[in-house]
Image (cartoon, grey):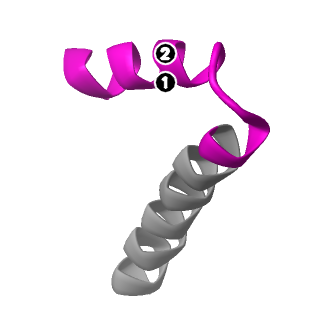
Amino acid sequence: MTRDELNRELRMHSATWQSVLVVYAGMVGALVLSAMAIV
């Protein structure tokens, strides 16, 4: 996780729940894609 991503996530905690959902959905999606690439 880069410093920019960390700062963005910290800012999202003070934003709406939709913004938080988008950030974490992106993280989960990236994890799933990398897992499929490995398999």
Residue at the image point whose x is 50% and y is 52% from the top: 27
Q: Is residue 17 above or below residue 10?
A: below
12 lies left or right of 36: right
Position of residue 18 relative to residue 12, above or below, is below
Q: Are marks 2 and 1 in contact (CB under 8 Å)?
A: yes
Image coords of residue 37 (percent x, y): 35, 83
| Residue type (three-letter) at the residue carrying disc 2 | Arg
Which label sits in the foreground, 2 or 1?
Answer: 2
Q: Tell me the crowding category of disc 1: few under 14, some 14 to 19, or many 20 or more residues within 10 angstroms, Cα based.
A: some
Mark on residue 38? Answer: none
Query: Up-down: is 30 above or below 18?
Result: below
Residue type highlighted by circle 1 = Glu
Q: Which quadrant would the N terminus be assigned to in this image?
A: top left
Q: Which residue is mark 1?
A: 9
Q: Tell me the SS state at disc 1.
A: helix
Q: Which is nearer the eye, 17 or 2?
A: 17
Q: Confirm whether residue 2 shows in the render.
A: no
Q: Secondary structure at mark 2?
A: helix
Residue bearing the label numbered 2: 11
Is 26 located above or below residue 35 in the figure? above
Q: Which residues are magenta?
A: 1-19
Please report the residue visible at 63 percent of the width from the left and 24 percent of the height from the top: 15
Q: Position of residue 22 (x, y in %)?
A: 59, 54
Q: Is residue 35 magenta?
A: no
